[in-house]
Image (cartoon, rainbow, N blue to C red):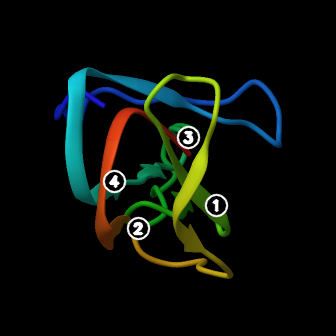
Amino acid sequence: MDGSPATDWQPQQITASLTVPLAQAATIQSATLDWGQAYPPPPAPNVHPPPGPVKTLRASSYDLLISTDGTSWTTAARVRDTTSGTHDVLTFPPVRARYIRI
């Protein structure tokens, strides 16, 4: 949303959506989504922690929707059955948008 890897969004329920207003209407043809990773909780005293991040926090299937008015939505890209990776780059034909929703 804001270019910072420190910013995250966690839905309160599944199925969820996130709508991002652009500063102004623009023609777009790609979107990049960076998914998070959950690190293990701290171990008990004198216990070695498990190695590295243990779970990728990502949607396995989602649509990227665009809108010029925030009311009528068009599917620009669709992702299905993706369970690995933390970086999605979606490309699609150029489209005018003021709002983006996943």
- The tag earlier along the polypeptide, 1 or 2, is 2
- Kindly identify which numbered label has been placed on residue 62: 1
Mark 1–mark 2 CB contact (< 8 Å): no
Residue holding disc 2: 51
Circle 1 or circle 2, nearest the eye: 1
Circle 3 or circle 1, nearest the eye: 1
Residue holding disc 3: 41
Question: Percent position (x, y) of residue 48?
Answer: 45, 58
Q: Compute the Cα span from label 3 to label 2.
A: 11 Å
- Kindly identify which numbered label has been placed on residue 34: 4
Residue 37 visible from this viewpoint: yes
User: The disc labelled 3 sits on which kind of residue?
Assistant: Pro
Residue 58 visible from this viewpoint: no
Question: Percent position (x, y) of residue 18?
Answer: 56, 31
Mark 2–mark 4 CB contact (< 8 Å): no
User: The disc labelled 2 sits on which kind of residue?
Assistant: Pro
Give the answer, above or below, for where 19 lies relative to 59: above
Local crowd size for mark 2, using a 10 Å CA cut-off: few (<14), some (14–19), many (≥20)? few
Residue sitting at x 74%, y 36% = 16
